[in-house]
Amino acid sequence: MLSGERFGSGLVVDGVLLRGAHGGAGEMRVLDIVQGVGSSDGIGATARTLVAEAVAAGEVRPGSPLAVDAGASAVFRAAQDGDTVALAIVDRLGDRLARVCVLLASLLDIDRVVVAGAIAQPAVAVIDRARALLDGWHFDPVPDLVASTLGGDVVVIGAVAHAVDAVRADPLSFPLGGTDRLSVDDRAAVPAPDPSPRSTRAGRTAHPAASR
């Protein structure tokens, strides 16, 4: 589940990516009406919003690192240092993530949620908080919640892996040099080259039909 600027999930069933009837499987616009979540904004975007709200409410002290940097990474660093506002934000982010996981688990009976994107590793504290809440809420099934190790390149890596799998699964389905797609049976029907080819001006060989 991509979780930086917005939540969006890739659903993998028996090793196959689920696309849906309209190609929209995994879109999470439904989060707009989920109580305690309210939007599909991801961990990074929501962290900035919560910091801005805390600043506006006068909760961020002038000496706090959050007064200088409202980014998610700054929030997580400040939480590690014991900043009370940052710790409260981490708790709220964890609660929000746990609710998203409950929704996915209830609808899809999933085994695991992999929190992906560049935010995944810095947001370990949020994931830990969400995992603790899931264990305490007793919503069955409780999915395994882990952070991806692929970082910000997760989408690119996934796309390349999918392309390689597609080529390996059916290499003859891809046209080469502008030629039409040929199946194995089609290629078997193509006549073999003439055993006594003519010489061309360039010194190459060509089938007699090529000169017509």
Image (cartoon, grey):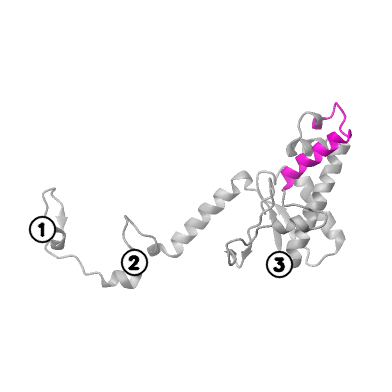
Question: Distance of mark 1 from mark 3, alpha carbons?
Answer: 64 Å
Based on the displayed image, in which of its 4 quarters is residue 5 positioned?
Answer: top right
Q: Amino acid at mark 3?
A: Leu
Q: Which comes sooner in the sequence, label 2 or label 1?
A: 2
Q: Which comes sooner in the sequence, label 1 or label 3?
A: 3
Secondary structure under badge 1?
A: strand
Q: Is residue 129 left or right of residue 194?
A: right
Range of residues picked out in magenta: 42-66
Question: Distance of mark 2 from mark 1, alpha carbons?
Answer: 27 Å
Question: Distance of mark 3 from mark 2, alpha carbons?
Answer: 39 Å
Q: Vertical placement of 199 versus 47: above or below?
A: below
Mark 2 Cα shell of 10 Å, populated few (<14), some (14-19), many (≥20): some
- Tags 2 and 1 in contact by the CB under 8 Å rule? no
Name the chief secondary structure element in magenta. helix
Give the quarter of the figure containing the C terminus.
Answer: bottom left
| Residue 202 is covered by the magenta coloring | no
Q: Amino acid at mark 1?
A: Arg
**Residue marked by disc 1:** 198
Give the quarter of the figure containing the N terminus.
Answer: bottom right
Residue at point 62%, 44% (across, down): 152
Q: Vertical placement of 71 versus 15: above or below?
A: above
Q: Which mark is residue 41?
A: none
**Residue marked by disc 2:** 182
Secondary structure under badge 2?
A: loop
**Residue marked by disc 3:** 108
Mark 3 Cα shell of 10 Å, populated few (<14), some (14-19), many (≥20): few
Q: Amino acid at mark 2?
A: Leu
